Image: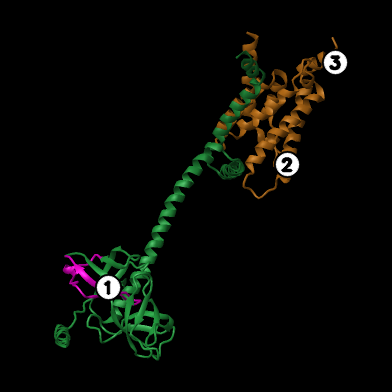
Chain colours: A orange, B green
Amino acid sequence: MNFKYGILKNVLLLVLLLLIQKTFINILSLSSLNISPDFVMIMLVYIGVKEGKISGSIYGFLAGLTADFLSGTFIGLSAITYTIASFLAGFFKSENEKFLAGYFFLISVFASSFAGNFIYFWIYFQGAPISLPEVIIKYVLTSSAYTTLISLVYIVFPRKKKIERSFLGET
Amino acid sequence: MKRIGQFILGVKEYLILTVLLIFSLAFLFSNDNTQIRFLRAVAVGMFGTVQSGLSSIPNVFDLQQENKLLRETNIRLSNEVSNLKEAKLENIRLTRLLNFKEFSGMGLVSANIVNKSIIQTRNTITLNAGEIDSVFVNMPVITDAGLVGRVVSTSRNFSIAQILFNKDMRITVKSQRSRIDGILTYDGVSTLSVINIQKSADIIPGDVFITSEYSNLYPSGIPIGTVVETGNLDNLFMKIIVVPLVDFASLENVFVVKYIQNKERYALEKTFQAGKK
């Protein structure tokens, strides 16, 4: 029952974040730098770190495919990006959920987001007159940093404090 | 089996990732935009590079098959080369004969030699031209190089000719340079010689003997052979060794000259000879 509830919760949250991502993202986009935060990525990293590589990659694949079908262009690009990013997030899974607590979560978000964005932009800019270092500096690093910055929301989330206390051994 | 199961369980995360990535890539490559076309080109390039690298590793079974195929091809090509060489040589030979036929101004019948003997005392050649081709007894046989012999027997489609290397052959000849007459004979072993020429005659090695106008069987002026050696046969006559201009060993095609001896002259000479006796 708890397992089913967990799946339902994750699916609902992902659908909500996907809708936000596709609808209100312009509000948070930095048009001067051509970057925008990735809420879905943050959620997927959370799932990957909490539930492991298998869950992370399956949620990542489904979320990515949904995002691709919602956008209607370049089907499969988000699917491959999210699948790999959330699978990598699974490497941060530990018994005490250390990487869900405090600034460790930021590290996992940045690392996974960097990998995902690297794949996304590398494919996206294929055939374009822009070098790989330029893609990394202008798009991969900045997008990852911005997503990591937005993920600070999770740190101030009340549930996170409970996890953090658990990790720090508080009662 | 248990080990395999344990191994699969150990790598299940990666197996699931691989499956999901395959699906993602399948979706990705179903697109038809610039990026995917570029990626396809890169993928094809990489695949080609890997394939090219792997192709340098010899595959024993492939090599065996390839060797077999190459051997067969080699034999086939060798046969073709041989046939082509043969055709080329035939072409050269026939072209030469054709040119000769055009320039000779004589009525000629071309024929191929279907049988030949050149190491006996009385050597002959069999031609694939006979009476149906207007070939008759005593007609001279020639090539572009010179005199071969004369027809001695005919059937409807074939004929037999005596060649110079025949002990029965005696031809009236003339030195092309000094116009001295003699008789060409074959010793039955290996040598052609011109006899009945006096010791004082002007004959030197290199002189060419041709058919004489005294001959009733051959038109005059057909080249026969070159003098290679001169000496004394006895107190009165020279010994003259001649090498024929025709290469009998490689002879394949000839012409029969439609030349019939003058019957009136023949009858007169015969009657006169009989009267002398």
State yes or no: residue A52 in magenta: no
Query: How far apart are the two marked residues, 2 and 3, measured between alpha carbons?
Result: 36 Å
Q: Which mark is residue B168?
A: 1
Q: Residue at x 78, y 24 (%)?
A: A105
Residue A170 occupies quadrant: top right
Residue A57 on image: x %, y % = 64, 24
Q: Judge by depth and name the residue closer to the eye, B142 or B11.
A: B142
State yes or no: residue B138 in magenta: yes
Q: Residue at x 31, y 68 (%)?
A: B253
Residue named by callout 2: A136
Q: Quadrant of the C terminus of chain B?
A: bottom left
Chain ID for label 3? A
Segment tinted magenta in the rendering: B127-155
Q: Secondary structure at mark 3?
A: helix
Q: Residue at x 66, y 40 (%)?
A: A122
Q: Are dots 1 and 3 in contact, CB under 8 Å?
A: no
Q: Residue at x 66, y 28 (%)?
A: A40
Looking at the image, can residue A75 be seen?
A: no
Q: Which mark is residue A168?
A: 3
Q: Secondary structure at mark 1?
A: loop
For label 3, count other residues whose C-alpha is less than 10 Å away and answer few (under 14), some (14-19) or many (20+): few
Badge nearest the viewer, 1 or 3 = 1
Badge nearest the viewer, 2 or 3 = 2
Looking at the rendered structure, whether the residues under marks 1 and 2 are on a common chain is answered as no
